Image: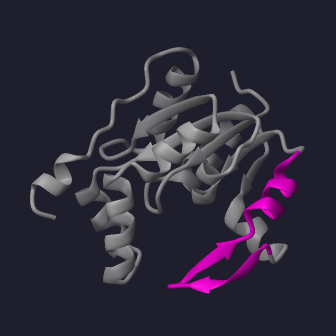
């Protein structure tokens, strides 16, 4: 069902951590959260606008022999041997989730625009042979797990297009 590594990526607030933990438990797979590795091993050069500037080559070396589920935003930016799931959330839903987390307006806008522009999906397609998109906008964590299992078993993934977000005057 899963190649060497199942990569779960997407903008903040799309459900990456929850999905990774739930799938890992269900499938009895090891799970790594890239933010934890980056902080623990100090794999960053600094902080910009509250976000760590990750040393991607160093993180890639850390994950080189990992088998299981790897979760994190920056994973769309690197090539690992596996399948990538890009979690997607409608921009207006994502905005509400990030507000609830206490993100400041600039960071919310940055992440909502990245989502609307398909940033993680585009990057993942450049770096992985198999990429699947999963819309988490209206799914519970349990529904998302079930949907991902169906996708990994061969069901088509979600067709995600938030381009109308900009046409609506955002």
Q: Can you say which quadrant of the picture contains the C terminus?
A: bottom left
Q: Residue at x 34, y 52 (%)?
A: 117
In the image, farthest residue toward the right: 65
In the image, farthest residue toward the left: 168
Residue 110 in percent (x, y) is at: 37, 70
What colour scheme was applied to this rendering of the protein?
one colour
Position of residue 88 in the picture relative to residue 55 (left or right): left
Is 32 rendered above or below residue 100?
above
Q: Can you say which quadrant of the picture contains the N terminus?
A: top right
Position of residue 137 in the picture relative to residue 60 (left or right): left
Q: Residue at x 70, y 61 (%)?
A: 34
Is 163 rendered above or below residue 1?
below
Q: Which of the 4 image quarters holds residue 37?
A: bottom right
Numbered range of the magenta stretch? 43-64
Q: Which of the 4 image quarters holds residue 143?
A: top left
Residue 135 in percent (x, y) is at: 37, 40
Tag count in the figure? 0
Q: Residue at x 83, y 39 (%)?
A: 67
Q: Which of the 4 image quarters holds residue 41?
A: bottom right
Inspect the magenta stretch and tell me whether residue 48 lies in it. yes
Position of residue 167 in the picture relative to residue 43 (left or right): left
Residue 31 in percent (x, y) is at: 74, 49
Residue 53 in percent (x, y) is at: 65, 75
In the image, farthest residue toward the top: 154
Inspect the magenta stretch and tell me whether residue 12 lies in it. no
Is 112 rendered above or below residue 45?
above
> Which residue occupies the foreground of this view, 77 or 158?
77
In the image, farthest residue toward the front: 126
């Amino acid at each position: 069902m899963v190649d060497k590594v199942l990569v779960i990526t997407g903008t903040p607030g799309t459900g990456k951590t929850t999905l990774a933990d739930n799938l890992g438990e269900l499938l009895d797979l090891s799970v790594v959260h890239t933010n934890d590795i980056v902080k623990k091993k100090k794999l960053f050069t600094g902080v910009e606008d509250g976000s760590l500037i990750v040393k991607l080559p160093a993180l890639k070396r850390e994950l080189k022999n990992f088998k299981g589920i790897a979760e994190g935003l920056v994973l769309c930016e690197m090539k690992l041997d596996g399948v990538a799931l890009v979690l997607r959330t409608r921009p207006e839903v994502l905005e509400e989730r990030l507000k609830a987390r206490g993100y400041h307006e600039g960071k919310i806008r940055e992440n909502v625009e990245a989502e609307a522009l398909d940033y993680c999906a585009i990057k993942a397609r450049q770096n992985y042979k198999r990429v699947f998109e999963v819309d988490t906008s209206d799914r519970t964590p349990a529904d998302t797990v079930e949907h991902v299992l169906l996708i990994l078993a061969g069901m088509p993934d979600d067709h995600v297009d938030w381009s109308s977000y900009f046409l609506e005057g955002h």
